[in-house]
Image (cartoon, grey):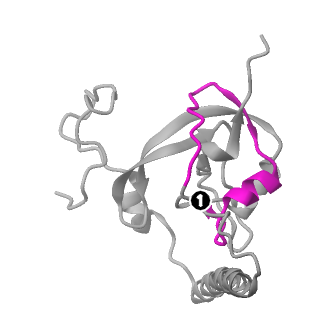
Amino acid sequence: MSNYPPCVNSTEKNNLPSLNYAPNATSKCQLYFYKEVADPISTLEIAWQFRNRLKSFSKRRLRYLRYYWRKLFSKDRDDSNQTTASIRVDLNPGDRVRVKSQQEIQALLNPWQEQNGCAFMEEMWIYCDTEQVVKKRVEKFLDEATLHMRTSKGLVILEDLMCEGTVDFGRCDRSCFYFWREEWLEKLEDQG
């Protein structure tokens, strides 16, 4: 018997179809088995990934220092860029939206390119000022760092907008959907 906790405890709670073909199997998320599925990483690859993490960490620290340096020596010490207030758009699957412009979104982000804990990745900027369709609301997701289920509010995923990797780490084939805060999107009126 495996000591991995199941991702799905009850088919009733999650509106999943009954799985009659494997009555004794427990449903586990594939994430629990990533170490067994992946090929071993070479020492050179480990060093390269460490370099990229250090580079990413350094960029964040510099951004942090620049922000507080400006705040310390700025004549206008107004913190109008705080992201605690959120404007809910109440988006639903199938809604057409416009991703706000880079300037509009930048005004909502803190120095770490986040709003209410959700990071706006560099790779997401190319979608600014484009029209997209909401795929679904994100109310529950698996936190891969802790392997716990988390709940959220004000997040959606958009159809066909997936992460293909980052500038710092290169290509990734998992194709994870980006999380989009509702505040970064503007609901478009139906023209039909």
Where is residue 135 drawn, in percent x and y? Answer: 60, 33
- Position of the C terminus, as image quadrant, is top right
Instruction: Give the number of marks.
Output: 1
**Element carrying mark 1:** loop
Name which residue lies at 64% across and 85% down.
61
Q: Nearer the viewer, residue 34 or 140?
A: 140
- Position of the N terminus, as image quadrant, is bottom left
**Side of 108 relative to 41 (left or right):** right
Establish if 86 lies above or below 79: above
Name which residue lies at 74% across and 83% down.
70
Is the residue marked by circle 1 packed among few (<14), some (14-19), or many (20+) residues within 10 Å?
some
Where is residue 38 drawn, in percent x and y? Answer: 49, 66
Name which residue lies at 56% across and 48% down.
86
Establish if 105 lies above or below 77: above
Q: Mark 1 points at which residue?
A: 83
Q: Quadrant of residue 165?
A: bottom right
Outermost top residue: 192
Residue 164 included in the magenta stretch of the image: no
**Side of 122 relative to 44 (left or right):** right
Q: Give the range drawn in magenta.
A: 85-114
**Side of 21 relative to 87 (left or right):** left
**Side of 7 relative to 126 (left or right):** left
Outermost front residue: 75
Q: State the predominant SS element of the stretch in magenta.
A: loop
Name which residue lies at 67% across and 61% down.
109
Say which amino acid is labelled 1.
Thr
Residue 161 visible somewhere in the drawing? no
Residue 101 visible somewhere in the drawing? yes
Where is residue 140 drawn, in percent x and y? Answer: 41, 45
Where is residue 145 drawn, in percent x and y? Answer: 42, 67
Q: Nearer the viewer, residue 162 or 83?
A: 83
Establish if 80 lies above or below 188: below
